Amino acid sequence: MARASLPVIVAGAGPTGLATALSLGLAGVDVILVEREPGLTVDLRAGSFHPPTTDMLVKLGCTAMLEKGIKVPTWQIRDRVDGIVAEFDLGLIADETPYPFRLHLEQHRLTPILLEQIRTRTPNVSVRFGNGLMSVADRGSHAAVQLDDGSRIDGAFVVGCEGARSIVRTAIGSKFVGFTWPEKLLVASTMFDLGTLGFSGAGYIADPVNFAAVFHVPDEGPPGLWRIAYPIDPDTPDKIVMDEALIRSRLKLVMEYSGANVDDFDLVYRSTYKVHQRVAENWHKGHLVIAGDAAHLNNPFGGLGLNGGVHDAVNLATKLAPVWLDGGDHIPAFTLYERQRRPINIKSVQAMSIRNKKLLEERDPDVRKQSQAEIAAIARDPIKARKFLMETSMLDSVQQAAAITLDTSVDADWSGMDAA
Ligand SMILES: Cc1cc2nc3c(=O)[nH]c(=O)nc-3n(C[C@H](O)[C@H](O)[C@H](O)COP(=O)(O)OP(=O)(O)OC[C@H]3O[C@@H](n4cnc5c(N)ncnc54)[C@H](O)[C@@H]3O)c2cc1C
């Protein structure tokens, strides 16, 4: 069998598309990466990498992320009023990973590192900014894309990494099964050091109304920024919820637990966004395949979305590269990719992020007390805490996915997982 004559077209230069293009490029595949925007996007989005994701990215050559990021070995679940409910130390799983910490580095600081690796190490990957995908079609023996400059390119395969509104997903004919949460989230950042108030670098704050996530992320240099995400009424116009005084009063609610008094803090950034839980029903068709947010979306409580996108990218590239290089049938490769990534996303990422959000926002005081007591008991017991950390750090899901084969007779575990 012969090597493919057409390149693989990757749509979208977000973290998933860049990681896919880099992984394929390093394996010797010709790639054209098309991105609609004129350069890498700089909006503040994902910022937390779990151990297996750091491992994958370091293996792709992104060692600079270790220098630029903040290592967060412990993370907390807190009650907004009472403070720490449970604290988890990733040192408990240090025998399972060379990176027993969450690495905090915002997405817009990772993507230049990925792009630099592409530019310096993969001459076979061509990156075209300002070149959006308009439409895509499977042509039986290959795929063809129409770009927004009117040009058309043929590709051996098209990988849709163009985020939540993926054109490739629509061309596959896939439903995006799941739901959208009723509230929006507002994310604001400050240089005020929440570490001085006892917050570890990552914290999830439980409260029936003012639940929140708190993350310490790097800025241009030390001491970094603290990002706080909290729920807002989706029907209140942004110009009201973005009012500085209102944001300050909400941030004070998070900071001023147990009588702490915080008056003077700056606001560096603020934005709002809608939150979804969705998984595409089909991840491939013909010569088209999707990855990252194009295939799945989840709430940010657990920091799982981007991590899953990188896991997709690396998984898909290891299957697609041999098909492209040696010929052969791509359908078993895409089928195995979907079997390894889709059920895991539903069983693990969707389930965990929904569970996390429900724990934080619980309104019934008795249920809230009970759930907090349960999580505190897990944190106190090293065996249970280790199991919990294997799950929440995504090490379990990566190991489980790797064990899945094309043999459907061993699939009993995955039954009943049709919708997020
Ligand atoms: C506020 C916020 C906080 C978050 N926090 C976390 C977190 O802490 N941890 C975590 O793991 N996840 C988090 N997420 C989720 C995370 O940001 C996403 O999962 C991640 O961005 C997905 O990467 P992606 O490359 O798949 O998609 P995207 O980052 O959306 O990238 C898609 C790319 O495709 C481009 N594009 C779109 N349409 C086209 C087209 N037609 N043609 C060509 N290019 C196109 C876009 O311009 C973009 O560059 C957060 C998300 C938000 C919104």
Image (cartoon, grey):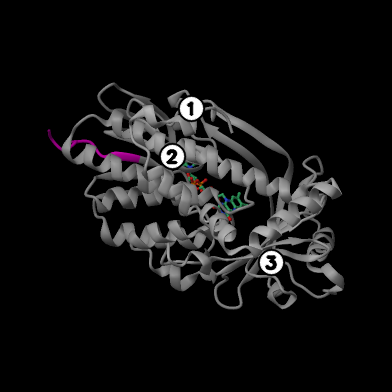
As measured in the structure, the alpha-carbon distance from the residue carrying label 2 to the one carrying label 3 is 37 Å
- Residue kind at label 2, given as amino acid type: Arg
Looking at marks 3 and 1 on the same chain, the residue that comes earlier in the sequence is marked by 1
Q: Is residue 8 found inside the magenta-colored segment of the image?
A: yes
* Residue that numbered label 2 is attached to: 341
In the rendered image, residue 167, in percent from the top left (x then y), is placed at 47, 32
Dots 1 and 2: beta carbons under 8 Å? no
Residue appearing at x 45%, y 73% in the figure: 67
Q: In the rendered image, which residue does mark 3 sit on?
A: 268
Q: x, y (%) of residue 412?
A: 46, 30
Q: Earlier in the sequence, mark 1 or mark 2?
A: 1
Of the 4 image quadrants, the one containing the N terminus is top left
Q: Residue at x 43, y 39 (%)?
A: 341
Real-space CA distance between mark 3 and mark 1, rounded to the nearest whole angstrom: 37 Å
Q: Is residue 232 among the parts visible in the rendering?
A: yes
Q: In the displayed structure, would residue 85 be above or below residue 1?
A: below
Identify the mark nearer the N-term, 2 or 3. Answer: 3
Badge 2, how many Cα within 10 Å: few under 14, some, many 20+? many
Mark 1 lies on a secondary structure that is helix
Task: Kindly identify the residue that appears in the image at 84 percent across and 45 percent down.
Answer: 364
Q: Which residue is mark 1?
A: 170
Say what amino acid the circle numbered 3 marks. Val
Count of all numbered marks drawn on residues in the image: 3
Residue 63's place in the image compared with 148, above or below, is below
Range covered by the magenta-colored residues: 1-9
